[in-house]
Image (tube, helix red, strand yellow):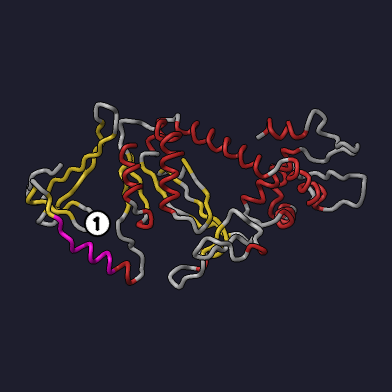
Amino acid sequence: MRPVLDEIDGPDRKRTKRGPQRLYSSEELESVLLFQRVCGLPDFRLARNLLASDRHSATRRILGFDRPRNAGRRVMRLTDGIPSEASMSRHRKRFGESRRLEIYRKLFERFRDEHLEDPAMREEARTLYLDGTHVLTHYTCPVRDGNGRVKNADDVTCADGGWVPPSKNMPWRTHGHGFNLMPLISSSGLPLAGPVTAINDSERSTAIRMIEDEFATEVAPKLDQDKLIILTADGGLHSQDLRRRLRPLGVVENIHIASHAERESSRNQVKKRDKVRVPIDGYRDWVANGHRELLCRCGKGTTARTLKRDGTGRAVVRAEGRCRSCGNVTIT
């Protein structure tokens, strides 16, 4: 971030066009904005008040705001060492949101790629987790009807967000105006990708786009090509299209076909699939249930998956099963 912020300040970053000295550099102002977002505060006024509180004296010292900047001009106050709302407003005009998003995106990619150069981090990336998280906003996003027309066009203050109506089967935190963040993380919590979409967009479609674009081109080539990767997600991401895009990349999906939510309809669906028995040609002692799980007819079979590659380098996943109880032959 520093080279970009120094460029914004210019060669004489201590002085504005009209003459008075600047009390804060762009780097200092950006640090306060980052503090606001880390704290999850909706506006800068709340962030400024929090930073000036007794509880954040250490934070002021770390950020360099523990000394007054207006000494000799007027009566000193606790907030004299912290940028004002006017200073932050000018900074946001100089460093707009689109440019900030671009720079932070590059920063994230560099952070991720440097981690994947470490063999230990690549090993942790063999276990992946994918799920959507709703991020609500106090702004008003478009509300669309069945034909896609915006019903509240005059009230929209956040055009790229979405809206999910209340539902008796969902907690209040999952509906309203906002966005959906879908991070793909490793077993240690390292984000490898993280598209942000409108809160009402399909999670399945978002996951497929992320796997095709970001994961396949930027992440998978940096992982160990001879090792199997397991991706765990909930039943809401069950999709044949998603599974077909994961397998050639050497990724085995651990995704339930049926949702295991507490709803009565979900429980009935799970029970129904538990009872299904699908015979497998050539292996009379093995069957599959409605969840596509291999089962020995004695009910105690175990399964494992391995990764191999064909002559073209394409990943081929083999499922193997062997019953440790009755000694049934292996199924592959």
Q: Residue at x 46, y 40 (%)?
A: 192
Q: Where's the C terminus, which quadrant?
A: top left
Question: Residue 136: x percent and y percent?
Answer: 57, 59
Q: Residue at x 73, y 32 (%)?
A: 6
Q: Residue at x 12, y 54 (%)?
A: 279
Asked which quadrant contains residue 12, the reply is top right
Magenta stretch contains residue 305: no
| Dot 1 amino acid type | His
Q: Where's the N terminus, which quadrant?
A: top right
Which residue, as the protein is rendered here, is positioned at the far right?
A: 73
Question: Residue 303: x percent and y percent?
Answer: 19, 47
Residue designated by label 1:
291
Along the horizontal axis of the image, is 74 left or right of 206?
right
Read off the magenta span.
268-278
Mark 1: secondary structure: loop
Along the horizontal axis of the image, is 55 left or right of 218?
right
